[in-house]
């Protein structure tokens, strides 16, 4: 990788871009993953590449809902694994919930590559110091996180073909699902099954954003880091969340870019 | 390619996406071309995927400047060739100006692939009917368009390395350059050399957009089709163009999406 100077104002964005290009070359991502990433880049650019106040509130709400859940699960696709895999493993370790690899264009090869990649990330995370303000045996907490996805023993009712495949112990059983960068169709079906769906999507106008119970309009790696802080803090209750109002707030942040 | 229904509201956008994915597989585009395309998609989404009134005015102004030029040239990169190559060949045929293939990540292989691709497009365009309101021998007009880029006998003063390479009869000699999807650095240098630089860029906040003489904030294929109409009509004069004001107008169009 070409070095990006520490001082570059858009350093994080450029690093993410390089990670996506590299992961595509390695076969971890589907054909159109780079295009999806580019769309995200543009929206993040309009957000000033920082977490807005409304995004912070939606992350806090998501943390409360994950903590209150009976069977929480974190569902990850290729882009999420390469951009925020480690951060989400930390979140799963604190919550003691499983992570399910669930990809839209499912091939056995990509599933295996992503599984191995996430497994490696998990080992790396297990060697880290305890996260700030978290007490306990970190290595044990991290290594007990279940990585699901390969079993393919569950189904999402209401979807057809490979897109319906999931894990029985993961998405199928879950009452609360964190699904960053989810497809609109699947998001809609998960909500219709009565599940609480927490989405991370930089486009507040996307169908996923509109369908979700709580939409975090933020870049997935930033959002995951902040989510970790909130699940550790565990200081807030589930509220009556008005997601339409939250989306309007996010749109306002984006449209204020016009005044730059 | 999977068929996209005629009735799909975002049909053109989805077709463009497929073209970019396919062209990447064929080696026509650089690694990050898909990411750049995705960014464009997001901005176009915010523009409602249609040509705004201010974009129409900037296309009209660009037509007037190309017609008034002594040595106009149309500089194309990979994404431009695959998305709008045919339309720009038509524009070049009407203007009787050369097209120069000029790519940021220059490799001999990609130059050759793009040259062959554009040459094929030219033959296809030459077999078409005359464009509406254009009189003359269309096949002769199209086949006399020079496709430059492989000579590498010119230099852009003020740039270093492969990015400085251009054609002596193309960009080096030109007084007016239409450069869709141009890099910010190169745009800045071309302007500093006293050239009139007409840019097509969906991001009104990009450095290219800010540096250009006239910025067309529109999708390149739509812009090229409308440009053809204006160069055929040849009905307007060059004006004192306030590009900063035009960019502010484009930003207003984008930020009004917030009211959707």
Image: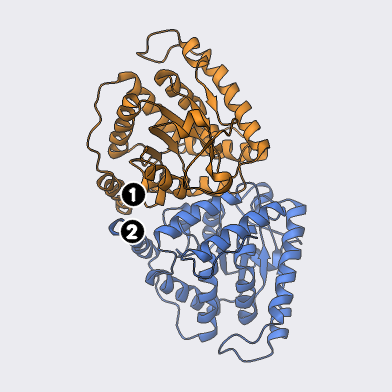
Chain colours: A blue, B orange
Indicate the quadrant containing the N terminus of chain B: top left, top right, bottom left or bottom right: top right
Q: What residue is at 53 percent from the left and 37 percent from the top?
A: B77
- Residue A185 locus on image (x, y percent): 54, 51
Label 2: state its secondary structure: helix
- Inter-mark Cα distance, 1 to 2: 9 Å
Tell me where residue B46 appears, x and y as whole percent.
Answer: 38, 48
Q: Residues within 10 Å of mark 1 (few under 14, many from 20)?
A: many
Q: Nearer the viewer, residue A221 or B105?
A: B105
Relative to A250, does residue A136 appear above or below in the rendering? Answer: below
Q: Tell which subunit mark 2 falls on.
A: A
Residue at 60% across, 73% down: A87
**x, y (%) of residue A105?**
66, 49
Q: Residue furthest left?
A: B240
Q: Which residue is mark 2?
A: A257
Residue B254 is marked as 1
Q: Quick one: SS at disc 1?
A: helix
* Marks 1 & 2 on one chain: no
Q: Inspect this view and state whether residue B1 appears.
A: no
User: Quick one: label 2, few (<14), some, or many (20+) residues within 10 Å?
Assistant: some
User: In the visual, does B44 lie left or right of A120?
Assistant: left
Residue A184 placed where, x, y %? 52, 52
* Residue plotted at (54% across, 28% down): B148
In terms of image quadrants, where is residue A16? Answer: bottom right
Chain of the residue displaying label 1: B
Task: Looking at the picture, tell me which residue is in the foreground, B82 or B115.
Answer: B115
Residue B91 visible in the displayed image? yes
Decide: marks 1, 2 in contact (CB < 8 A)? Answer: yes
Tell me: B254 left or right of A192.
left
């Amino acid at each position: 990788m070409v070095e990006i100077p520490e001082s570059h104002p858009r350093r994080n964005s450029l690093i993410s871009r390089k990670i996506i290009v590299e992961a595509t070359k390695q076969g971890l991502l589907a054909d159109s993953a780079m295009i999806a990433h580019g769309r995200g880049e543009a929206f993040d650019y309009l957000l000033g590449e920082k977490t807005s106040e409304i995004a912070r509130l939606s992350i806090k709400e998501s943390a409360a809902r994950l903590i209150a859940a009976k069977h929480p699960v974190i569902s990850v696709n290729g882009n999420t694994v390469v951009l925020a895999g480690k951060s989400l493993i930390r979140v799963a370790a604190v919550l003691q919930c499983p992570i399910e690899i669930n990809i839209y264009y499912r091939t056995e090869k990509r599933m295996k590559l992503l599984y191995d990649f996430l497994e490696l990330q998990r080992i790396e995370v297990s060697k880290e110091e305890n996260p700030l303000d978290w007490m306990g045996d970190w290595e044990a907490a991290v290594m007990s996180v279940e990585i699901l996805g390969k079993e393919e023993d569950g189904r999402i009712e209401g979807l057809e073909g490979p897109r319906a495949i999931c894990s029985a112990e993961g998405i199928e059983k879950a009452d609360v699902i964190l699904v960053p960068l989810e497809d609109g169709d699947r998001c809609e079906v998960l909500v219709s099954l009565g599940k609480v769906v927490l989405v991370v999507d930089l486009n507040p106008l996307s169908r996923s954003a509109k369908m979700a119970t709580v939409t975090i309009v933020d870049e997935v790696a930033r959002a995951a880091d902040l989510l970790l802080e909130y699940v550790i803090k565990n200081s807030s209750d589930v509220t009556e969340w008005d997601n339409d109002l939250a989306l309007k707030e996010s749109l306002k942040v984006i449209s204020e870019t016009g005044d730059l």
